[in-house]
Amino acid sequence: MRSRFESLRAEAVARRTDGCSIREIEAQLGIPRSTLSGWLRGIPLATSHQASLKRRADESLARARAKAAAWHRNAKKERLARIKEQADGFIDTLDMNETAALELALAFLYLGEGSKKNTTSLGSSDPRILRFFVSALHHLYAIPRSSPRCELHLRADQDEKHLTTYWSRTLGVPRKNFGKSSFDKRTTGRPTYSQYKGVCLVRCGRLEIQRRLLYIADSFCEKAASRAVSSVGRASA
């Protein structure tokens, strides 16, 4: 059966020969792509036209990828905002003055990050963790902020004086409480990111605090694990 677009065939062929893509001809003349594919199959294109079509296809693909990447970034941003809102809502349900919750949080932080040797100490490059550590020691065990001793572990190109001032102000620990810093010679000649402030080690002289925190974390883990196992057992019985 003769196509109702037959009168446009010559125009379609001419535009194809001029270097138009099938998509462009479809949009310009209103001819279905299935019809155009049959008409234009085998029509040779000049090398310059082939290069032009490829360039436009590549540009179109790049725009599509950029659009998709932007969509994914926005979607991720929205997911993270929802998660943060949920987390903030959870924190709002807690009594921040309740010592049991504070001590349990400190116990698990210490279990993961604290020294297990004969000292109560914790080192980190994250100021939030160390601010919490110093603050929790003060609120839970009445350890004065002037009491902890600190030392810095720095990369070879870092400024000890500047970073001692930074950590002293950040933690509220007197500068005089900072001992001699150590430098990692393996980093010589390798520049440090400006946001990296080294590792600060905070020491507290009371060993009984370390033991208490580790016992709390260990006991909680054991009881929570046993409860979970018991629940599974009852469910399968």
Image: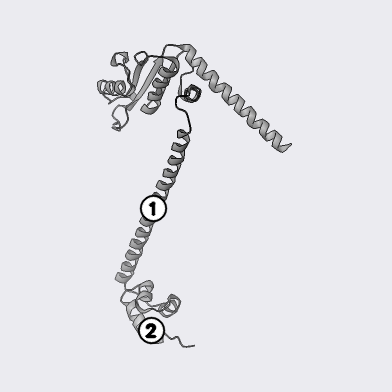
Indicate which disc residue 201 carries.
none
**Residue 20 position in % (x across, y down):** 33, 74
Please report the residue visible at 51 percent of the width from the left and 16 percent of the height from the top. Answer: 212
Badge 1: how crowded within 10 Å, few (<14), some, or many (20+)? Answer: few
Q: Which quarter of the figure is the C terminus placed in?
A: top right
- Which quadrant holds residue 124? top left
Helix, strand or loop at mark 2: helix
Q: Are dots 2 and 1 in contact, CB under 8 Å?
A: no
Q: Nearer the viewer, residue 58 or 176?
A: 176
Task: Give the foreground label among 2 and 1.
Answer: 1
Please report the residue visible at 29 percent of the width from the left and 20 percent of the height from the top. Answer: 164
Q: Nearer the viewer, residue 115 or 101?
A: 101
Q: Amino acid at mark 2?
A: Arg
Q: Is residue 102 above or below residue 177?
A: below
**Residue 75 position in % (x across, y down):** 42, 50
Q: Which residue is mark 1?
A: 69
Distance from Cα at disc 2 to Cα at disc 1: 39 Å
Indicate which disc residue 9 carries.
2
Q: Nearer the viewer, residue 182 or 177?
A: 177
Q: Is residue 186 above or below residue 210?
A: below
State whether residue 126 appears in this view.
no
**Residue 157 position in % (x across, y down):** 27, 26
State whether residue 45 appears in this view.
yes
- Which quadrant holds residue 172? top left
**Residue 233 position in % (x across, y down):** 70, 34
Helix, strand or loop at mark 1: helix
Badge 2: how crowded within 10 Å, few (<14), some, or many (20+)? Answer: some
Q: Amino acid at mark 1?
A: Ala
* 161 lies left or right of 29: left
